[in-house]
Image (cartoon, grey):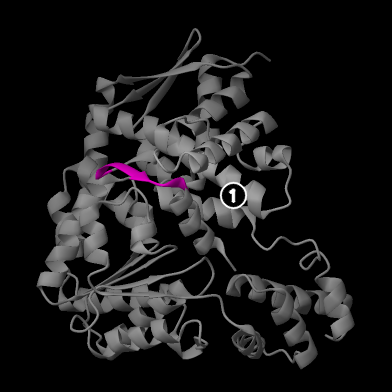
Amino acid sequence: MTMTADDHVEKINAIIAHKVGPQRYKIWFKNSTKLAIEDNYLKVGVPNLFIGGWIENHFSDQIQAAVREVTHREMKVIFTIDPELFGSQRRRQLDSQAESVARNANPSPLQRRTNRFTRSSRLRLKLDNFVVGPSNQLAYNAAKTVINEPGKVFNPLFIHGGCGLGKTHLLQGICNCMAEAREDLNWTYVSGEDFTNQFVLALKMGKLDSFRRRFRNTELLVIDDVHFLASKKATQEEFLHTFNAIDTAGKQVIMASDAHPKMIGQLSESLVNRFISGMVVKVEIPDFATRCTILRQRALEMKKQIPDAVIEYIAEHLRANIRELEGALLKVIAYSSLSRTPVNLAMAHEALADHITRTDPIVHLSDIESAVATFFGITPADVHSSRKTRTVSLARSVAMYLARKHTSMSFPEIGRFMGNKNHATVILACRKVDELIKKSADKNAIWETPAGRREMKMEAILKELEHSISR
């Protein structure tokens, strides 16, 4: 049966929804776009230039991939203003959403208590079971100080470190402690992505006043993954005003990121200066003793008896982060349950055979990709994409160079990992970086940030990134 153009559009929409995720699809596509296929073009109808520009800049790759998957050919994607998207049904829907935002923007004391219990129930991590060791002692002490003296000593408190090292645990623990101490506390915990999405939605609906009342009147604002604001100029400006309003009122701001504020590329100088004006503390990779303690505590929480030999075996061989440790422990317990054998060292060897190998590289490609993306203020998806802007192209070249230098992967393997690029692309990228290193005496690497053009010696860039990804 031959598919009609409408059938194609329906399938393209479904694939886009899968690729961008339900939340982004609902905000940007569901009621904001109208797709149509005409000849060799996919027309994307949008209500205004702002939404069209945002979708084009952030979701072009996903749209193109969906078109290819459905039509099995390349089609040019064009954006057009569609007056029908301003229809009465859409206005009623936006008004309904705006009323919901407004109701929550300035809650009464009773609503704040209700919100406190609702939000607290979603924050499952508490300081009571946070394992403290040399790697996180300073961050933990700073968290306790903020709990006891909010808005007075460390404001803002900025916690940074690699993925899976306990930053989110500390942030949620602070929220839970402070909310339990004061039931009427007006506090807000969101990720950088949530803050951005809510700001853009308020902008689309013309309800910025409600958005600002909600965030600027809070007594405790906690932002996880604040590096998500990188390269989003309008969101950064809004967050700066939000930060200043809370700080001026003597209230507390706490943030977490994968990198030091100065290492987050595409972040305005004003924000960086505000971030480093308080307490900036790093969470390091836990040492062997701390890793053992974490494993014993997790086993205790799961009510499982794990021999010390197994605990030490896991802690010795898995050093990257806490999530990796917990995943290995869970796998051993599951393997024991399914095979109906007691947990012992021999069984742990067998269960973790694919987890622990002698050839496991000291640095993983995902670590490199994450560090480079954060430094240049882009996303790993940008590194994988076909975008060739100055910033993305430079970041991709640096990531490929570091991957070749610090892993045992071949040129074709690196290319396949970074968006199915061919091996020649990786070779050229490495040569480009080598050339910049050789000419570093009189030539800088150049890229764009929201604050303008930035220049830096390639040797200095590599040094900072290698320090960031080092074990």
Q: Residue at x 22, y 31 (%)?
A: 88
* Image quarter in which the C terminus is found: bottom right
Whole-percent x and y of residue 208?
16, 50
Q: Is residue 337 left or right of residue 155?
A: right
Question: Is 339 in front, or is 11?
Answer: 339
Q: Residue at x 46, y 58 (%)?
A: 464
Asked if the stretch drawn in magenta spans residue 457, the answer is: yes
Whole-percent x and y of residue 261?
34, 62
Looking at numbered disc 1 in the image, what kind of residue is underneath it? Leu
Q: Is residue 136 left or right of residue 82?
A: right
Residue 288 sits above or below residue 406 on the image: below
Whole-percent x and y of residue 347?
87, 79
Residue 471 sits above or below residue 127 on the image: above
Question: Is 87 in front, or is 28?
Answer: 28
Residue 325 visible in the shown view: yes
- Taking the view exactly as shown, the residue that stands out farthest to the front is 441
The magenta segment is 450-458
Q: Is residue 305 left or right of residue 193?
A: right
Q: Residues within 10 Å of mark 1 (few under 14, many from 20)?
A: many
Q: Quadrant of residue 51?
A: top left
Q: Residue at x 67, y 42 (%)?
A: 414
Q: Residue at x 55, y 29 (%)?
A: 66
Q: Secondary structure at mark 1?
A: helix
Q: Circle 1 sits on which residue?
A: 402
* Image quarter in which the N terminus is found: top right
